[in-house]
Image (cartoon, grey):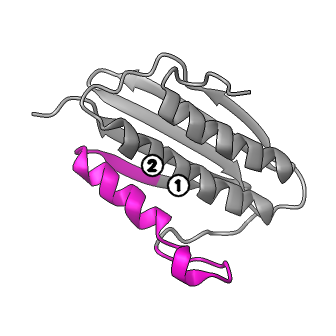
Amino acid sequence: DALIHTGNVSIDSVIDDKLSLAKEKNIIYEENAKNMYYGDIEINELALLIGLALDNAIEACEKVEENRYIYFEARNKKDYLVIHITNSIIPHTKPRFYKTSKLVDKMNHGFGVEEIKDIVKRYDGDIQYDTKEDRVVLRIILKTKKD
């Protein structure tokens, strides 16, 4: 029952997996990611980045009692791929965005943020987290063409 999200099998598979997990946890998921241009971005790295970012969004949403949601958007702007992932958080909290995990199995968790940063760096990109009252917006910019 695979869905077409971006048109790339690897990325769509990752999104399908995370979408299934989100549904199990009563998290509303919406997206706008069709016709993405990847250029020189390694698809497996991009799939890993998206998977890790969605894992983090799902983990944050699990802590919210009502109005759990994730919105994934990817679009191209000139020579860049711009990804926004918005997710609900507990109102008026300030998440910390570094290697940290609240999960019991700390040996196998907490590395997502660092891996995302490493991938972004390899593609001369930028990463920003913007915390609003009841949501976080992760903004990732990746260069699609190597110099």
**Identity of the residue drawn at 39% across and 42% down:** 44
The residue carrying pointer 1 sits among few (fewer than 14), some (14 to 19) or many (20 or more) residues within 10 Å by Cα, namely many
Residue drawn at 63 percent across, 44 percent down:
86
Q: Which residues are magenta?
A: 99-128
Q: Position of residue 147 (x, y in %)?
A: 9, 33
Q: Residue at x 89, y 61 (%)?
A: 65
Residue 122 percent across, percent down from the top left: 23, 50
**Residue most toward the front?**
1
Depicted 28 relative to depicted 80: above or below: below
In the rendered image, residue 113 lying in the magenta stretch gets the answer: yes
**Is 76 left, or right, of 74 in this rendering?**
left
Q: Residues within 10 Å of mark 2 (few under 14, many from 20)?
A: many
Q: Determine whether the residue tagged by mark 1 lies in a helix, strand or loop.
A: helix
Where the N terminus falls, by quadrant?
Answer: top right
* Residue at the image point whose x is 25% and y is 44% from the top: 123
**Position in image of residue 28 (x %, y %):** 81, 40
- Whether 9 is drawn above or below 135: the answer is above
The residue lying furthest to the right in this view is: 66
Report x, y in % for residue 77.
Answer: 36, 23
Helix, strand or loop at label 2? It is helix
Q: Quadrant of residue 72?
A: top right
Residues under numbered marks 1 and 2 in contact, where contact means CB atoms less than 8 Å apart: yes
The residue where tag 1 is placed is 52
Residue picked out by circle 2: 49
Q: Callout 1, which amino acid?
A: Leu
